[in-house]
Image (cartoon, grey):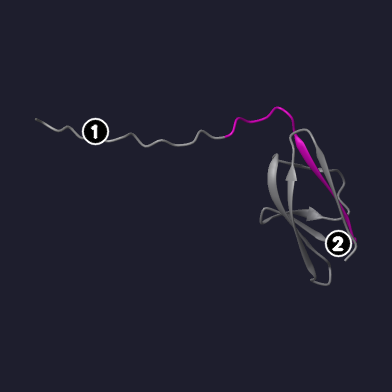
Amino acid sequence: PRVVIKKEAAVTASPPRPSSKKSFLMVKSLPGTEVVVDNKAVGKTPLSAPLEVSPGARFITLIAPDGRKKGYAIEIDAGDTYNLSESF
């Protein structure tokens, strides 16, 4: 008998469907604290408005004017605003 081996097509997970609801991050800290979201600098406090971020898991780093750092692993649901306060 003849044996036929079929190659399976590579299966990739489809990307998450974008939500129509936006998520926001509000940071309150010492004036001049650098705000970094997922390794990208996004501004310094005081922020003029909440930051728009993608829903899901985010890593926030705050860097005080004197160089002290604090990191936060957070989860933001679509349509929510996450409030983060840090006084160092």
Q: Nearer the viewer, residue 49 or 25?
A: 25
The relative height of residue 43 versus residue 81 in the rendered view (above or below) is below
Say which residue appears at 78% left-offset and 33% top-offset.
Answer: 79
Q: Quadrant of residue 23?
A: top right
Label 2: few (<14), some or many (≥20) within 10 Å? Answer: some
In what element is the residue under mark 2? loop
The relative height of residue 80 versus residue 31 in the rendered view (above or below) is above
Task: Say if mark 2 contacts mark 1, CB within 8 Å.
Answer: no
Left or right: 9 in relation to 48: left
Left or right: 27 in relation to 61: right
The part of the chain drawn in magenta is: 16-31
Q: Which mark is residue 36?
A: none
User: Does the magenta segment cover residue 22?
Assistant: yes
- Picture coordinates of residue 41, whole percent (x, y): 71, 56
The relative height of residue 17 versus residue 45 in the rendered view (above or below) is above
- Picture coordinates of residue 54, whole percent (x, y): 69, 40
> Which residue position is annotated with label 2?
32
Q: Which mark is residue 6?
A: 1
Whichever of labels 2 and 1 marks the residue nearer the N terminus, that label is: 1
Q: Nearer the viewer, mark 2 or mark 1?
A: 1
Tally of numbered discs: 2
Q: CA distance from mark 2 to mark 1?
A: 60 Å
Seen from this angle, which residue lies furthest top?
20
